[in-house]
């Protein structure tokens, strides 16, 4: 078994170093049969200021060097942090998910929570407040009574599922540049046109003089305008280059679904290009939603022609209660779309019925 890295006295690394030493001693008891040999092993892994301290302790032949547990206890007093670390509590209070992934946020939170000494209710409240706002909104209906670890696991599932369904919906939209590629247009070489308005740049006074006397702006001769000038070379027609548009971000809203005794908060996609209203097969089973055969079997494709699911739509789920915001409640039936990463899609039928003021783009 590999030995721990040399320890030089860092308070941050103290606890981890002692843990690694303890593992070596437990896995190889025949090599370290007594307290003195265990203490000697730990000292052999020290360097820097930690080794200087151990040297002074060992040379004194004090009782602490003959009892491994006493040596460890004194070692923690000298190099370790207090069991309840006030700085950990401050870091935990200020910890926010921000741009971190949900996994990194949960890991940092668990690490600080283990040493801050807070009770579970305070930890849950702090963890909830530090979440990215969209994830926190999804967890609005989640009770704190489920415990910290279950709450963290639930937040990870919600964040992962939300990210997957948003990514799936974004992939259905292609930027204009991938559909209509514009060719670069090279600028023509300037001609030797001493009186060309565009090239020689007439002074404002000369331009005004020619306009007043009805002279050609190109050659300066009377009797015609610049558009009918016979000595002016023809100009190439240049098409405008349309810059690529950014990807359209999908519209979505947080809704609450209730079926039987199960209630869940999910992200519903608002898609005026969808011919129906859909619920994923996974969410349907999670809600224990009753389903019945659909009179028509559908194959669902994205606007790019790519199937959204490998399976056909054969069943209808419902009724279930749909809540949008605080005021809107309704009973709704949804087509069951298996293998979909989007929990729910509210399509054209729902949008035409309710006409929500969400800025929903119409698609032909």
Image (spheres, grey):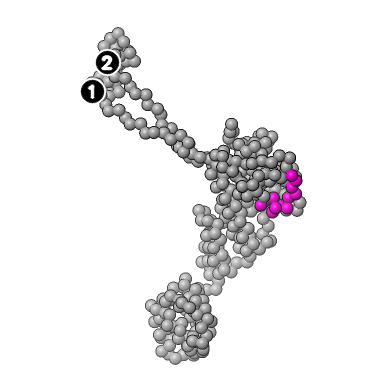
**Over which residues does the magenta segment extend?**
282-293
Q: Quadrant of residue 334?
A: top right
Name the one closer to the observer, 218 or 83: 218
Where is the C terminus found, in terms of image quarters? top right
Q: Is residue 87 left or right of residue 350?
A: left
Residue drawn at (61%, 60%) of the image:
152
Helix, strand or loop at disc 1?
Answer: loop
Residue 76 is at least partly visible in this image: no
Name the one closer to the observer, 117 or 345: 345
Name the one closer to the observer, 186 or 23: 186
Q: Quadrant of residue 312?
A: top right
Read off the residue under disc 1: 192
Q: Is residue 286 magenta?
A: yes
229 in relation to 304, above or below: above
Tell me the distance, in whole angstroms, between the alpha carbons under discs 2 and 1: 12 Å
Q: Is residue 275 magenta?
A: no
Image location of residue 191, percent across then percent down: 25, 24
Helix, strand or loop at disc 2?
Answer: loop
Read off the residue under disc 2: 231
Image location of residue 29, percent across then percent down: 52, 85
């Amino acid at each position: 078994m590999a030995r721990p890295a040399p320890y030089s006295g860092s308070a941050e690394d103290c606890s981890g170093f002692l843990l690694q030493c303890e593992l070596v001693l437990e896995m190889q008891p025949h090599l370290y049969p007594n307290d003195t040999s265990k203490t000697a092993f730990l000292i052999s892994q020290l360097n820097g200021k930690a080794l200087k301290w151990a040297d002074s302790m060992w040379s004194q032949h004090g009782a602490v060097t003959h009892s491994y547990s006493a040596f460890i206890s004194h070692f923690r007093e000298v190099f370790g942090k207090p069991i309840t670390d006030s700085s950990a509590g401050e870091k935990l209070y200020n910890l926010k998910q921000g741009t971190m992934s949900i996994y990194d946020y949960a890991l940092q939170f668990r690490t600080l929570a283990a040493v801050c000494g807070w009770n579970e209710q305070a930890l849950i409240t702090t963890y909830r407040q530090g979440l990215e706002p969209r994830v926190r909104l999804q967890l609005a209906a989640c009770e704190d009574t489920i415990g910290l670890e279950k709450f963290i696991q639930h937040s990870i599932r919600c964040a992962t599922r939300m990210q997957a369904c948003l990514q799936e919906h974004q992939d259905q939209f292609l930027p204009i540049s991938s559909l209509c590629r514009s060719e670069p247009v090279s600028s023509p070489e300037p001609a030797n046109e001493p009186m060309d308005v565009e090239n020689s740049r007439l002074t404002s006074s000369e331009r005004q003089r020619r306009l007043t006397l009805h002279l050609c702006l190109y050659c300066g001769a009377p009797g015609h305008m610049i558009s009918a000038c016979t000595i002016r070379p023809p100009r190439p027609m240049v098409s405008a280059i349309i810059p690529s548009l950014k990807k359209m971000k999908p519209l979505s809203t947080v809704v609450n679904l209730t079926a039987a005794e199960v209630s869940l908060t999910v992200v519903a996609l608002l898609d005026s290009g969808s011919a129906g209203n859909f619920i994923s097969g996974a969410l349907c089973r999670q809600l224990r939603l009753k389903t019945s055969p659909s009179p028509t079997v559908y194959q669902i494709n994205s606007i790019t022609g790519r199937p959204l699911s490998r399976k056909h739509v054969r069943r209808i789920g419902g009724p279930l209660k749909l809540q949008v915001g605080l005021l809107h409640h309704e009973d709704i039936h949804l087509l069951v779309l298996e293998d979909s990463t989007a929990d729910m899609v509210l399509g054209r039928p729902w949008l035409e019925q309710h006409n929500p003021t969400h800025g929903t783009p119409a698609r032909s």
